Amino acid sequence: MTDWRNEELSNPTAMPGPGNGRPPDRKAGNSVSVRFRRFAIGWLLLLTTIWVLDPYLMGWWFSASTPRTVTARGNLGANEQTTIDLFKKASPSVVHVFARGAPTASLFSGGQQSLVQSGSGIIWDSAGHVITNNHVITGTAQIGIRLTSGEFVAGRVVGTAPNYDLALLQLERPSSALHPITVGRSADLQVGQSTFAIGNPYGLDQTLTHGIISALGRRLPTDTAHEIKGMIQTDAPINPGNSGGPLLDSAGRLIGVNSAIVSGSGASAGIGFAIPVDIVNRVATELIRNGHVPLPGIGIVAARQAEATSLGIDGVVIVRTVPDSPAASAGIQGVDADGTIRDVITEVNGKPIHSMDELASTFENAGIGKEVTLTVQRDGRSRNVKLRIADISQLNQG
């Protein structure tokens, strides 16, 4: 029987390896490791080179060295086309109003300078009447109006209605064609309707913004302490310079005159107010006919409601009466020189009155020439005073 172990041990050609009792060849393992490291380093250098050269290679291969091919757009959307048509139709009716104050002495230049304020306006009719806000022109001496044609025309004041923050101007001999605004109604407006405002915010001519009617029936005080009722609230961006410009519905009709914003920064915060066109239509007609708007009243100046409330008084505190007014003729008295309150109006025709706005509304509802009975408190005692409502717009308020 052959002894394989002896034969294997005696065979000088037997391969070394794990099963033959001889140690492995370390030189072969080291050679494989060196080749792997060289391979890895080569790939790392290649990737680094590609990463460094990538911007240059991309710029070389993909740069558009010739004009790009224009991709056909297709038709505009229906809403887009409607808005474009609306702007083309209404924008020629919007003007830029510039009002310059009286010259005043300058401490720095040694001469005189005057402040220029600007706003927007609306061409009302073919005769060249322009509607704007009263606060745009208040306290100014000269008025200039730039039309959409670029023509600059002098303007004059036909009449103002401070209680409605409206003013009517007249263009002086314009040579460009005039485009009166298309007038709508505000009585049938609904919250959620689209609104479009055109104006000159920050002096930027012919700016269009878009929004919705956010609320109706708002009340907004004016500089005369009279509140405008039925104001339109919109989130269409309105900024300084939009004052006096139109608020339009989706048909391009005038539904309001932009008048004020509520904002902590003075810029649009999505709360803007417009005077309803139904009021504008009535006021404009009165200003064209008479140069003023009849204002029902009795000729009193009242304390603010907050001041009366702080004193624990429920009613209209009379500060003073206007000379030759129905109130003065009826013996109603204002605050004494020492600050003593004399008369407080608490009722009209037996209906309790809590504020000057309620009193003004009562006079408007009754109408000029109508007789009313006031309940007046003085020194803790009440008395009834009969007087007739007058047009106080022409009274000397001084």
Image (spheres, rainbow, N blue to C red):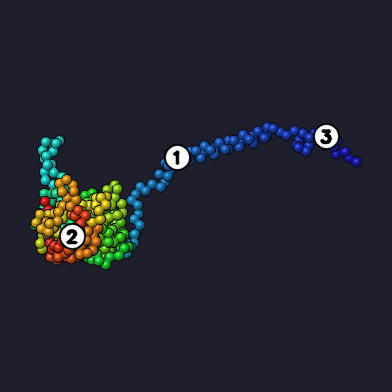
Q: Which numbered mark, 3 or 2, is in the foreground of this view?
A: 2
Going 27% across and 61% down the picture, which residue do you hit?
A: 217
Please state the horizontal and vertical placement of residue 338, each as a whole percent of the image: 16, 45
**In the figure, residue 165 lies in which quadrant?**
bottom left
Q: Report x, y in % for residue 152.
A: 13, 52
Q: How many angstroms separate mark 3 from mark 2 (CA)?
A: 143 Å
Q: Are marks 1 and 3 in contact (CB under 8 Å)?
A: no
Q: Nearer the viewer, residue 244 or 251?
A: 244
- Label 2 Cα neighbours within 10 Å, binned few <14 / some 14-19 / many ≥20: few
Q: Amino acid at mark 2?
A: Arg
Q: Secondary structure at mark 3?
A: helix
Gap between marks 1 and 3 measured at Cα: 62 Å
Task: Say which amino acid is labelled 3.
Answer: Leu
Give the residue at mark 3: 9
The answer to whether residue 63 is left or right of residue 169 is right
**Residue 173 in view:** yes
Whether residue 145 is visible here, answered yes or no, is no
Amino acid under disc 1: Leu
Point out residue 187 in the picture as x, y percentages from the top left corner.
25, 66
Dot 3, how many residues are within 10 Å of its Cα: few (below 14), some (14-19), or many (20+)?
Answer: few
Q: Looking at the rendering, which quadrant does residue 20 occupy?
A: top right
Quadrant that contains the N terminus:
top right
Q: Is residue 282 left or right of residue 52?
A: left
| Residue labelled with disc 1 | 53
Q: Residue at x 49, y 38 (%)?
A: 48
Q: Nearest the camera: 379 or 194?
A: 379
